[in-house]
Image (cartoon, helix red, strand yellow):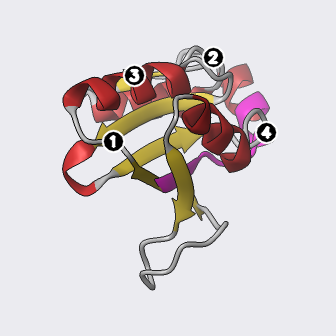
Amino acid sequence: MHHGRSSLRSLAALTLLVTTAGCSGTLVSETDVAADAAAPPLQSVEFQISGMNCEGCERSIERAVAQLEGVIEVEAFQEDARVVVTIDPALVTPRTIESQIERLGHEAVLYTGTTGELTTSAKTF
């Protein structure tokens, strides 16, 4: 699991990282809360990947996607050929992530997981 460069650019991103690590924290500045309230919600997007058949592929995809501004977290799963990415949609789009993965020689298709169909929608949280 890799965290992107913009991991600490918003309160929502910091909160996600802290809670994912099993920790908790206390907000010190209320100014940060007001600024973060205007920020768009984070999204979790999932891609089906062709040609990802080893742990080396997982790591190279995670590193490449984590370099994109707006990527909060990325996890690749070679067993079921998928990549799950948490993004700030104001900074990065699913299409940008697809392009980054395709530069590595893999085909990436956005997947909803709800109906079993490949599509271009994303889950917001």
Q: Residue at x 59, y 38 (%)?
A: 102
Foreground tag (4 vs 1): 1
> Which of the labelled discs sits on residue 90, or is there none?
4
> Which of the labelled discs sits on residue 29, or is there none?
2
Foreground tag (2 vs 4): 4
Q: Say what amino acid the circle numbered 4 marks.
A: Ala
| Classed neighbour count for the residue bearing mark 4: other residues with Cα under 10 Å, few (<14), some (14–19), many (≥20) | few
Q: Earlier in the sequence, mark 2 or mark 4?
A: 2
Q: Earlier in the sequence, mark 2 or mark 3?
A: 2
Foreground tag (2 vs 1): 1
> Which of the labelled discs sits on residue 60, or is there none?
3
Secondary structure found at label 2: loop
Q: Residue at x 26, y 27 (%)?
A: 21
Mark 4 vs 1: CB contact within 8 A: no
**Image quarter for residue 118?**
bottom right
* Residue 41 within the segment the image draws in magenta: yes
Task: Give how far apart the Cα atoms at labels 3 and 4 are.
Answer: 25 Å
32 or 20: nearer the viewer? 20
Query: Is 52 situated above or below 58?
Result: below
Secondary structure found at label 3: helix
- Residue 36 in the image: x percent, y percent? 71, 33
Q: Can residue 125 be seen in this snapshot?
A: no
- Report the span colored magenta: 35-47
Task: Give how far apart the Cα atoms at labels 2 and 1 are.
Answer: 43 Å
* Residue 97 within the segment the image draws in magenta: no
- Residue 41 in the image: x percent, y percent? 66, 48
Q: Is residue 87 left or right of residue 115?
A: right
